[in-house]
Image (tube, rainbow, N blue to C red):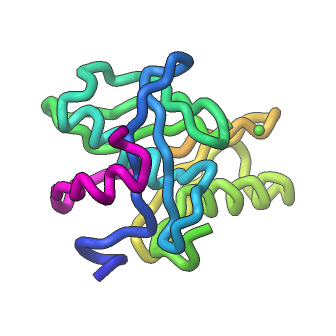
Amino acid sequence: HRNLGVGSDGILVVHKNAKANFAVRIFNPDGSEAEKSGNGLRIFSKFLYDHGYTNETEFTIQTLGGMVNTRLILEKGRVVAVRVDMGRAAGHTFASGSSACAVATACFDKKLVVGRVTVQMEGGNLTIEIDKDLNLVMTGPVEEICTGKLSEDLRRRLGAVP
């Protein structure tokens, strides 16, 4: 079940980048490439830590939509939440970090919230912090549900293997 188990709203591929600690390409279910995915970036950040790509709890990720700062929140050495600085299309999902940021910004603009808001969605809650310059920081839980291996053919098609 793509929303409640193995499945996804897209595929994220690790890349190297001279400007950031990591870079990611984000592919939507229709094969198009996304500039940014709030939830994808949180999951990607946890993946990097859990699978030994980094032992740092703060690092940068380059996306097509720009540089993103991320901070892992650990409890007893385990990543339980990730903060992604979102800064300035996958269809309906049970929890969209990018959409939560948009809702929080709209509420802030209408003066319905000040500073911090919890956005409740089918897939869980996200906390969005907003400052006067509309800089957004998203915090929410992360869990790994499975691991797998993409075939070399698919990785080559995605540009991950020369």
Vertical order, 147 against 52 (above or below) = below
Left or right: residue 70 compared with residue 78: right
Residue 141 on image: x %, y %: 35, 51
Residue 148, quarter of picture: bottom left
Residue 146 on image: x %, y %: 16, 60
Residue 118, quarter of picture: bottom right
Nearer to the camera, 152 or 78 = 152
Nearer to the camera, 4 or 6 = 6
Which of the image's four quarters has the C terminus?
top left
Left or right: residue 56 compared with residue 124: left
Left or right: residue 77 compared with residue 43: left
Q: Determine the residue positioned at 49% across, 24% down.
A: 17
The residue positioned farthest toward the bottom in the image shown: 1
Q: Determine the residue positioned at 29% across, 35% down.
A: 48
Nearer to the camera, 47 or 110 = 47
Residue 85 on image: x %, y %: 58, 35
Which of the image's four quarters has the N terminus?
bottom left
- The stretch drawn in magenta includes residue 141: yes
Nearer to the camera, 93 or 76 = 93
Residue 58 on image: x %, y %: 40, 22
Q: Is residue 120 visible?
A: no
Q: Which residues are magenta?
A: 139-162
Q: Determine the residue positioned at 75% across, 53% down.
A: 105
Q: How many marks?
A: 0
- The stretch drawn in magenta includes residue 144: yes
Vertical order, 133 against 59 (above or below) = below
The residue positioned farthest toward the right in the image shown: 110
- Magenta span: chief secondary structure: loop
Q: Determine the residue positioned at 50% across, 52% down.
A: 26
Q: Is residue 12 visible?
A: yes
Residue 66, quarter of picture: top right
